[in-house]
Image (spheres, grey):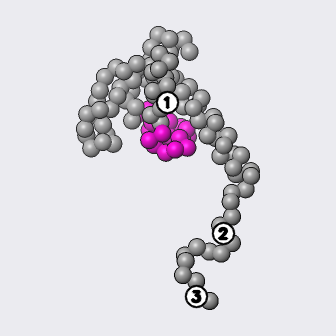
Amino acid sequence: MLQTSMALPGFDLPPSPAITAISEALKAEFPTKAKRFVLTHLRRHGPTSGEDLTDAMKSAGINCPEGDKGYGWIYRALHRDDLTEDYGVAYRRKGNGTKGATIWRITAKGLKA
C-alpha cells in the first residue's frame, strides 16, 4: 500500500504521563520565577524595557510556556500589584523601531517585596 502522509506510523502517541507532569510543573512555576527575576533585575539595574527584561529572563532560562508574547501579563501583574510602574517609553527593538516599548522601574513597595 502506498503511504501518502509524511507521518510515520506508530508515532502519534500522546506524551507520557511523566512528560506531561514535568510540563505542568514548569508552567506552574513560571509566574513566580518570572516575577522574582523582574524585581531583582530592576533592583540591580534600574529602569529597563520590557523587551530587555524578556530577553534577560530567556537568557537566565526562565521561558514562558506560551512563547515570547506570553511575558506581557507578568509585567501587567507586577504593575497591578504596585510593585513596578511605567517609567517611560522607548523605541522597540522587536517592533521595527516603532515607539511603544514600556520602560519599567521598581516602586517603593516593590523594593520591599
Q: Which residue is mark 3?
A: 2
Query: What amino acid type should be assigned to the residue bearing mark 3?
Result: Leu
**Contact (CB < 8 A) between labels 3 and 2?**
no
Q: Which residues are magenta?
A: 52-70
Q: Is residue 36 left or right of residue 16?
A: left
* Cα separation between marks 2 and 1: 36 Å
Query: What amino acid type should be assigned to the residue bearing mark 2?
Result: Phe
Q: Is residue 97 left or right of residue 78?
A: left
The numbered disc on residue 13 is: none
Image location of residue 20, percent across then percent down: 69, 49
Q: Residues within 10 Å of mark 2 (few under 14, many from 20)?
A: few
Q: Which residue is mark 2?
A: 11
Q: Residue at x 56, y 15 (%)?
A: 113
Q: Residue at x 34, y 28 (%)?
A: 102
Q: Residues within 10 Å of mark 1 (few under 14, many from 20)?
A: some
Image location of residue 46, percent across then percent down: 41, 21
* Cα separation between marks 1 and 3: 50 Å
Return the residue nearer the eye: 11 or 50: 11
Q: Would you identify the image quadrant in which residue 84 lies?
A: top left
Image location of residue 103, percent across then percent down: 35, 26
Magenta segment includes 76: no
Magenta segment includes 56: yes
Q: Which residue is mark 1?
A: 74
Q: Residue at x 70, y 51 (%)?
A: 19
Name the secondary structure under disc 2: loop
Q: Residue furthest bottom?
A: 1
Return the residue nearer the eye: 46 or 68: 68
Name the secondary structure under disc 3: loop
